[in-house]
Image: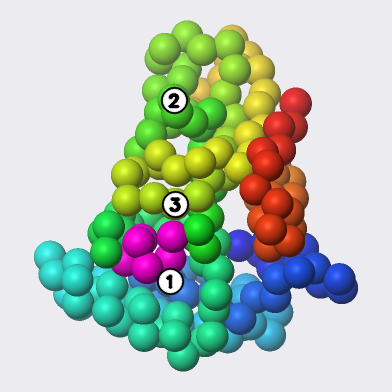
Amino acid sequence: MVALAQSMQGDHPAQPVLVLSNRPGAGGLAKAAAMGIDTAVVDHTRFGNDRAAFEVELQAALDRSGADLICLAGFMRVLTAGFVSHWTGRMLNIHPSLLPKYRGLHTHARAIAAGDAEHGCTVHEVTPELDDGPILGQARLSIVPDDTPDSLAARVLPLEHQLYPAVLRRFAQGDRSPIFLP
């Protein structure tokens, strides 16, 4: 989130209007506030299993902000098809794997366990299917013999900070052609 917000300066075609979290203590909220970006919290735990009610509040917060594009970054809740469909073509996500491999969780451990030679991250459009939307960019690196899930995650993170802002800039300009970083 911070890398995205910092990239949206000068002639950038997008501007951050809201950082929204489903967790009241999320560190990104204080960082966003320090950058002068409005923040909001819709605590998912208040809704139990009522995803629809949670998403109504999410949508209300987004409506109040005037957002016309959503960039998910560390938002670890599965969104329903109804919510996602409202934002079709206007919601991006970054995922720590080379999609279509390793949708969902524990991607670094899964890549190591599979004996993969490469790993990385993907920015994609969000669709109702989990981690399945059109790929807008990927960055990759080699898995080394002594990698652990934690060390691999730490090595992928700088790639995420490079890839997501690059994809966002192009996407906000209407360019959906994918970017592939080595």
Which residue does the numbered mark 1 point to in the structure image? Answer: 21
Give the mark nearest the N terminus, 3 or 1.
Answer: 1
> Magenta residues, as a range?
83-88
Look at label 2 and name its amino acid: Lys
Quarter where residue 84 is shown = bottom left
Q: Quadrant of the C terminus?
A: top right
**Which element carries disc 3, helix, strand or loop?**
loop
Label 1: element kind: strand
Per the image, the residue denoted by label 2 is: 101
Q: Tell which circle, 3 or 2, labels the residue nearer the N-terminal end.
A: 2
Q: Please, what is the three-letter code of the amino acid marked with disc 3?
A: Val
| Residue under pointer 3 | 126
Left/right of residue 86 with respect to residue 3 in the rendered view: left
Label 1 packing within 10 angstroms: few (<14), some (14-19), many (20+) = many
**At 68% across and 85% down in the image, what residue appears?**
36
Residue 42 picture quarter: bottom left
- Pick the quarter of the image with the N terminus: bottom right
Q: In this orientation, does residue 135 appear? A: yes
Amino acid at circle 1: Ser
**Measuring 68% from the left and 62% from the top, which residue is drawn there?**
172
Image depth: mark 3 or mark 1 in front: 3
Q: Is residue 45 left or right of residue 162?
A: left
